[in-house]
Image (tube, grey):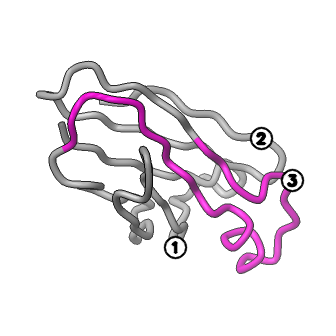
């Protein structure tokens, strides 16, 4: 299974560049930073079925942009049952709200 993420700043309508992302299960598996398009591809390499968490460091992102946010981090827990596929976990971010969904 491969994993990617994409972070969009809903207040600006632009990719959220420079957001630190950490993938964990029973410990840290991989880390990354969103690129100029707000993406991190290939997090963790080839992953097995199981429960994982993506942690987004939103406090640092908002501070660097001079924005006061309510959520210092966003943690998304998800379960992979199909270890053969690709999974994409997008995050739509704003200072006082966020949303996510299973992408393609």
- Alpha carbons under labels 3 and 1: distance apart: 19 Å
Label whose residue precedes the other's in the sequence (1 or 2): 1
Judged from this view, the residue extending furthest toward the top is 81
Residue 71 is covered by the magenta coloring: yes
**Do residues under tags 1 and 2 come within 8 Å of each other at their CB atoms?**
no
Q: Circle 3 sits on which residue?
A: 70
| 50 relative to 59 in the view: left or right | left
The picture places residue 102, in percent across and down from the top left corner, at 42, 26
Residue 103, position in %: x, y?
37, 30
- Residue segment shown in magenta: 47-75
Alpha carbon distance from label 1 to label 2: 19 Å
- Element under label 2? strand
Instruction: List the residue tagged with mark 2.
Output: 97
Q: Name the residue under label 1.
A: 18
Which numbered disc flags the more N-terminal residue, 3 or 1?
1
Image height of 85 relative to 53, above or below: above
Occupied quadrant, residue 67: bottom right
């Amino acid at each position: 299974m491969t994993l990617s993420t994409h972070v969009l700043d809903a207040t600006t309508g632009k990719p959220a560049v420079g957001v630190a992302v950490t993938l964990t299960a029973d410990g840290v598996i991989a880390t990354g930073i969103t690129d100029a398009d707000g993406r991190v591809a290939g997090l963790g390499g080839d992953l097995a079925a199981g429960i994982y968490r993506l942690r987004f460091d939103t406090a640092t992102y908002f501070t660097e942009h001079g924005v006061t946010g309510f959520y210092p981090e966003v943690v998304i827990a998800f379960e992979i049952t199909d270890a053969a596929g690709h999974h994409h976990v997008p995050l739509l971010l704003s200072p006082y709200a966020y949303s996510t969904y299973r992408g393609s």
